[in-house]
Image (tube, rainbow, N blue to C red):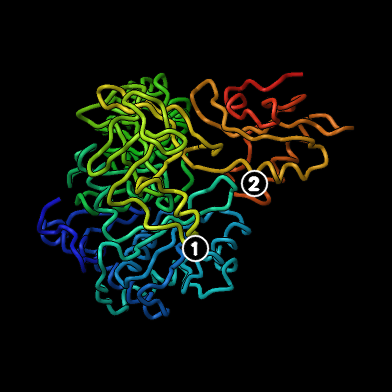
C-alpha cells in the first residue's frame, strides 16, 4: 500500500478509499458489477458520500449503530461506507436469519437506523427503518456528507460470530483494520491488481465475503461482482461467463458441489481461487485445481481478525496445509493453559496483529476471555512444521463449520430435543464422499417412537421454522445411542467421522 494513502490518525476509511482511487487514476475504472449495472470507482465514492447524506437525514450521527441487513448489492456498499463516512458503526447481519435471530441482534445492537430490503422491514418495526429501495431513490438528490474525523481505532463495523452457547457475539473493528487484512491477503497472498475481477461465494455480511467483495477491490482498484442470490454452481457459471473474473473465493463445500454439478467450460479466465471457512482436504484441493485450471489457495481467517491471516500464497503453497502466517500478523501455538509450546508441537493457535477485534459488543467478559497475554485464542488446533506451514487439526470446541459458516450445534440440538420422538440428539458436520461438509442430526428415538422418513421431515421442518436455513440438518440418522466418554460427555468427533452406533 502506497505511503501517499497510508492510514493515519484522522483518516476515515471511506475518505481514504476515495482519495486512493483519485490519486491512482482509478475513478473511471469499474468497481462493482451488480445485476445489469456496473459502477466505476468514481461513481461508487460519489454514491457513498450521498448515501452518508441520506443516513444523516435519517438521524444517524457519529458513534451511532447502523444495522445493515442486506444481501450483496450496491446498496450494501453505499450503506456500509456511508456509515463509515459519518463515523457511525455498521453492524452487518445476515438477512436470511430467522425472525427470532433478527430480534436478538436488533436488541443487542440498539441501532439508530436499520437498513434492509422491503421484505424485512416489518421485522424491525421497533427501530427506524430505511429501506434499500428508498436509499437508492433518494441518493441522486442527497447532499454529500463530509467525512467525519476518526482515529485508526475508532469503531467502524461489527460482524456476528457464534459462540459455544449459540448466542452470537459481534466482533468490533476499527477504521484501520481493513487496510491490514487487505495487505495480508490482497497483496501478500494474491497480488491483486486493478485489472482483476473478483467474485465471492461467501456473502459480504460474513467476514470472508466482506474482504473479498468490498474491501479488496476498493483497495486494489479492481472490480468485484456483487452476487445477491444464494450460491449455486449454475448461477456462478452464468456470472463467470458474463464478467470473466480472475479470482474466485469460495468454501470447500461449494467447491465439491461445483465439481459435481458445474460446467467447467467458462472457468478458464481464473488465475487463482481461494478457499476458507473450513479445512480443504487435499483430495478435493487437487480435484479443484485440475478442474479450475488454476491454484486453489487454502487459508484460515476469522471474524475476530477480520479476514484471512494464515494462507497459502501464489509464491508459497503446500497441499494439505492452510499455508503460512501472512504479514502483518504473528501466530503462536500454545497449550490449553495458554503456555507457549515448542516448535512442531500441536496446540491451540493464537494470533495477534493490527486488525484483531477491539472487543465483542456488549460482552466485556467474553472479550477478556478471548485473549491470552495480548494474543487472541482462536480455538483452532494446529501444528507448524519446520518450514512454517500450518497444519490444521480441527477445533478445540464443538463449533461446526457448514458451507464456510461457523455455527453452534447446541441451539439446533435444544430445538430438536423438544420433539416428542427425540430422546437424545447430537448434531455434527459430516463429510460426504465428495468432500462436502453437511449438517447431520443423530437422534436416539424416545420410547414408543421409531425413526422414519416422516419423523425426519418433521424434525427438519422444526428447525427450518425457527432458525436460519443453513442450520437445518441435511439428514437425520436414527441411532440406538450416542458415543460418550465414561463421564457422559459426548464424543462429537466420532459423529463427524460417521462413527455413530448403529442398530
For marks 2 and 1, give the one nearer the viewer: 1
Quarter of the image for residue 342 reads top left
The correct choice, above or below, for 264 with respect to 70 in the image is above
Q: CA distance from mark 2 to mark 1?
A: 21 Å
| Residue behind mark 2 | 411
Quarter of the image for residue 62 reads bottom left
**Identity of the residue drawn at 48% across and 60% down:** 69
The correct choice, above or below, for 477 with respect to 16 in the image is above
User: Callout 2 environment at 10 Å: few (<14), some (14 to 19), or many (20+)?
Assistant: some
Residue 277 in picture, x, y percent from top left? 43, 38
**Identity of the residue drawn at 47% across and 32% down:** 253
Which label is found at residue 362?
1
Residue 257 in picture, x, y percent from top left? 47, 30
Q: Nearer the viewer, residue 160 or 197?
A: 160
Q: Nearer the viewer, residue 487 or 302?
A: 487
Q: Is residue 196 toward the left or the right of residue 461 in the image?
A: left
Q: Nearer the viewer, residue 483 or 411?
A: 483
**Identity of the residue drawn at 22% across and 59% down:** 41
Q: Are marks 2 and 1 in contact (CB under 8 Å)?
A: no
Q: Earlier in the sequence, mark 2 or mark 1?
A: 1
**Identity of the residue drawn at 43% across and 53% down:** 205
Count of numbered marks:
2
Q: Label 2, secondary structure: give it.
A: helix
The correct choice, above or below, for 349 with respect to 29 in the image is above
User: Callout 1 environment at 10 Å: few (<14), some (14 to 19), or many (20+)?
Assistant: few
Amino acid at each position: 500500500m502506497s505511503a501517499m494513502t497510508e492510514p493515519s490518525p484522522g483518516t476515515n476509511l471511506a475518505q481514504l478509499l476515495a482519495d486512493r482511487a483519485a490519486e491512482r487514476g482509478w475513478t473511471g475504472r469499474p468497481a462493482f458489477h451488480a445485476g445489469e449495472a456496473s459502477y466505476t470507482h468514481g461513481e461508487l465514492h460519489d454514491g457513498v458520500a450521498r448515501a452518508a447524506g441520506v443516513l444523516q437525514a435519517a438521524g444517524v450521527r457519529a458513534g451511532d449503530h447502523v444495522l445493515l441487513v442486506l444481501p450483496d448489492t450496491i446498496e450494501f456498499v453505499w450503506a456500509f461506507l456511508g456509515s463509515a463516512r459519518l463515523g457511525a458503526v455498521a453492524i452487518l447481519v445476515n438477512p436470511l436469519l430467522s425472525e427470532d435471530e433478527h430480534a436478538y441482534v436488533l436488541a443487542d445492537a440498539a441501532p439508530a437506523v436499520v437498513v434492509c430490503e422491503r421484505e424485512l422491514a416489518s421485522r424491525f418495526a421497533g427501530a427506524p427503518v430505511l429501506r434499500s429501495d428508498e436509499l437508492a431513490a433518494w441518493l441522486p438528490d442527497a447532499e454529500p456528507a463530509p467525512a467525519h474525523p476518526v482515529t485508526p481505532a475508532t469503531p467502524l463495523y461489527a460482524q456476528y460470530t457464534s459462540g459455544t452457547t449459540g448466542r452470537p457475539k459481534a466482533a468490533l473493528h476499527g477504521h484501520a483494520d481493513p487496510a491490514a487484512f487487505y495487505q495480508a491477503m490482497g497483496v501478500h497472498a494474491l497480488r491483486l491488481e486493478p485489472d482483476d475481477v473478483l467474485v465471492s461465494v461467501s456473502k459480504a455480511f460474513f467476514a470472508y465475503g466482506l474482504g473479498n467483495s468490498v474491501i479488496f477491490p476498493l483497495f486494489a482498484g479492481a472490480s468485484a461482482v456483487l452476487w445477491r442470490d444464494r450460491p449455486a454452481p449454475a448461477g456462478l457459471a452464468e456470472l463467470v461467463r458474463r464478467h470473466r473474473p480472475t479470482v474466485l473465493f469460495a468454501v470447500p463445500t461449494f467447491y465439491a458441489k461445483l465439481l459435481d454439478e458445474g460446467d467447467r467450460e467458462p472457468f478458464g479466465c481464473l488465475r487463482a481461487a481461494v478457499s476458507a471457512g473450513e479445512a480443504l482436504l487435499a483430495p478435493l484441493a487437487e480435484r479443484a485445481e485440475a478442474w479450475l485450471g488454476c491454484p486453489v489457495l487454502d487459508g484460515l481467517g476469522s471474524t475476530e481478525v477480520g479476514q484471512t491471516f494464515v494462507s497459502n500464497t501464489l509464491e508459497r503453497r503446500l497441499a494439505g496445509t492452510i499455508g503460512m502466517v501472512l504479514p502483518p500478523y504473528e501466530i503462536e501455538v500454545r497449550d490449553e493453559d495458554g503456555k507457549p509450546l515448542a516448535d512442531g508441537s500441536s496446540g491451540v493457535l493464537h494470533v495477534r496483529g493490527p486488525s484483531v477485534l477491539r472487543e465483542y459488543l456488549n460482552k466485556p467478559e467474553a472479550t477478556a476471555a478471548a485473549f491470552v497475554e495480548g494474543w487472541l485464542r482462536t480455538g483452532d488446533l494446529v501444528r507448524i512444521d519446520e518450514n512454517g506451514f500450518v497444519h490444521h487439526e480441527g477445533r478445540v470446541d464443538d463449533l461446526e463449520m457448514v458451507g464456510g459458516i461457523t455455527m453452534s450445534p447446541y441451539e439446533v440440538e435444544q430445538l430438536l430435543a423438544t420433539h416428542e420422538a427425540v430422546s437424545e440428539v447430537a448434531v455434527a458436520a459430516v463429510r460426504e464422499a465428495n468432500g462436502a461438509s453437511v449438517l447431520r442430526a443423530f437422534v436416539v428415538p424416545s420410547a414408543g417412537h421409531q425413526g422414519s422418513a416422516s419423523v425426519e421431515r418433521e424434525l427438519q421442518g422444526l428447525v427450518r421454522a425457527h432458525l436460519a436455513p443453513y442450520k437445518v440438518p441435511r439428514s437425520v440418522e436414527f441411532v440406538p445411542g450416542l458415543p460418550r466418554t465414561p463421564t457422559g460427555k459426548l464424543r462429537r468427533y466420532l459423529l463427524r467421522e460417521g462413527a455413530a452406533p448403529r442398530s
